[in-house]
Image: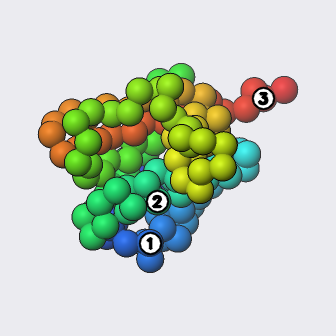
Amino acid sequence: MSGRQLEREYEGTTGTLRAARSDVVSWLNGHQVDHDLQERAALVLSELASNAVQASPGNAFSLRMSFADDGSVVMAVTSRTDRDGPPPRDDWGPATILATRGRGLLIVGKLSDHVDVDQPAAGTIVVTATFRPAAQG
């Protein structure tokens, strides 16, 4: 897990969420990434993995993390979907203020420095979140 890239696949059950979060934090900690970024990345992974499991129970989801040339951390979560395309950014929130669901991508957008949602093939969705490290000073 200490390489420049982390790649894992997890069963599509809520029982794998803790292991996925642990893998993210351990990998980032191994690269001496600051604690704030570790916490944000763990929360983003939790949201994206939960979304993957809820959208397609029983289907595996995958995680890929790496460093960009500028030192940013890039996290990509790939999962199954039955949607015809990724949700438009305007729909990244609950349908109503009292809705019990629908905040996942909104939270991901707030905790990440940049988010892309792509559907590279029918039935597959990839959410990529980029985190810039805190300025050293």
Q: Position of residue 118 (x, y in %)?
A: 31, 31
Q: Quadrant of the C terminus?
A: top right
Disc number lying in front (3 or 1): 1
Where 103 sits versus 131, above or below?
A: below
Asked if disc 2 and disc 1 are in contact, CB closer than 8 Å, the reply is yes
Query: Which of the marked residues, 3 or 2, is nearer the chain's N terminus?
Result: 2
Amino acid bearing label 2? Ser
- Residue at (39%, 39%) from the top-left corner? 127
Q: Earlier in the sequence, mark 3 or mark 1?
A: 1
Is the C-beta separation of discs 3 and 2 under 8 Å? no
> In the rendered structure, which amino acid carries the disc numbered 3?
Gln
Q: In the structure shown, which secondary structural element does the residue marked by tag 1 occupy?
A: helix
* Residue found 25% across the figure and 52% down from its top: 80
Q: Quadrant of the N terminus?
A: bottom left
**Which secondary structure lies at badge 2?**
helix
Report x, y in % for residue 49: 44, 57
59 or 38, which lies in front?
59
* Residue beneath disc 2: 50
The residue that mark 1 highlights is 14
Residue, disc 3: 136
Is there CB contact under 8 Å for labels 3 and 1? no
Which residue sits furthest top? 70
Q: Residues within 10 Å of mark 3 (few under 14, many from 20)?
A: few
Q: Is residue 16 left or right of residue 18?
A: left
Q: CA distance from mark 3 to mark 2?
A: 33 Å
